Image (tube, grey):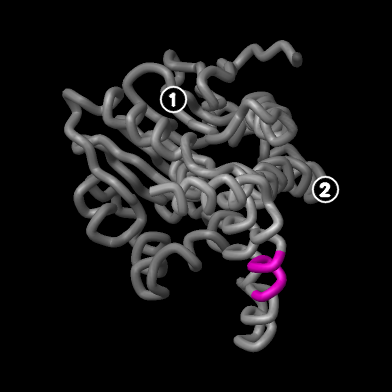
Amino acid sequence: MTSFQKILYQVENGIARITLNRPEKKNALDSELISEVKDAVRACAGDENARVVLLTGAGTDFCSGADLSGLQRTFDNGPLENMAEARNMAELFVEMRRHPRPIVAAVRGRALAGGCGLATAADIILASESAKFGYPEVNIGFVPAMVMAILRRSLSEKRAFELITTGETISGQTAFDFGLVNCLFADETFDLDVDAYVSKLAAKSASAITLSKRLLYHMDTMSFEAAIEAGVETNAVARMTADMRKGIEKFLRK
């Protein structure tokens, strides 16, 4: 197993826990942390014991965005160096999208800029009532460029446009109302509620969830007819899985 310096990683009871572990920096993103998250995501993709991936932040915040000291270096970088920095995050988003297991982001405190992008790249977002979300990049003349491909699919076009052009920070309740957040939990019971949610998800058929995630995201660029045909193929594959055989047998015994 890879030794990590800026994240914590463990697999237990079917849950792969990836924790951003820079609480003194509000879990600010730098290239090393992004690479470690990417390595952990890849590691649990091949681990049969990992049925759900839970992405969290140590301390009071999920992630406050990019490490400012790293951003200052971009002024001295050339275009190729800046593209390499950007591609590191882009590759993480693609790895998360292609991951065979559901990835759940548990957001307590702030998820801003790249941190909000990281949460948005997850399949499901669980948030505490006091959580804050936002893409404030426009306020410093920057653009939340890579995550836009995901945000565009997660919210209505007008909501996505509003978030990225106003740079405003929104509450957990507003993020829930917008449809960015799946579930909103009380601060006092947040950890217990998150554990209950991911444990329930981990108990579902792994093959069915893998096939469902792959099909849902694969349909992004398909015509209606092609998407229906892809559904036919996935339906046929699902019928042959051990999980479905067990599920039918259990149903018939009732």
Magenta span main SS: helix
Give the magenta range.
232-236
The residue at the point 70 percent across, 36 percent down is 45
The kind of residue tagged 2 is Leu
- What SS does tag 1 mark? strand
Mark 2 highlights which residue? 80
Q: Residue 145 vs residue 138: left or right?
A: right
x then y, percent, for residue 220: 61, 72
The kind of residue tagged 1 is Gly
Q: Residue 124 vs residue 235: left or right?
A: left
The residue at the point 63 percent across, 73 percent down is 231
Examine the structure image and report whether residue 171 is included in the region drawn in magenta.
Answer: no
- What SS does tag 2 mark? helix
The residue at the point 67 percent across, 66 percent down is 234
Q: Earlier in the sequence, mark 2 or mark 1?
A: 1
Mark 1 highlights which residue? 57
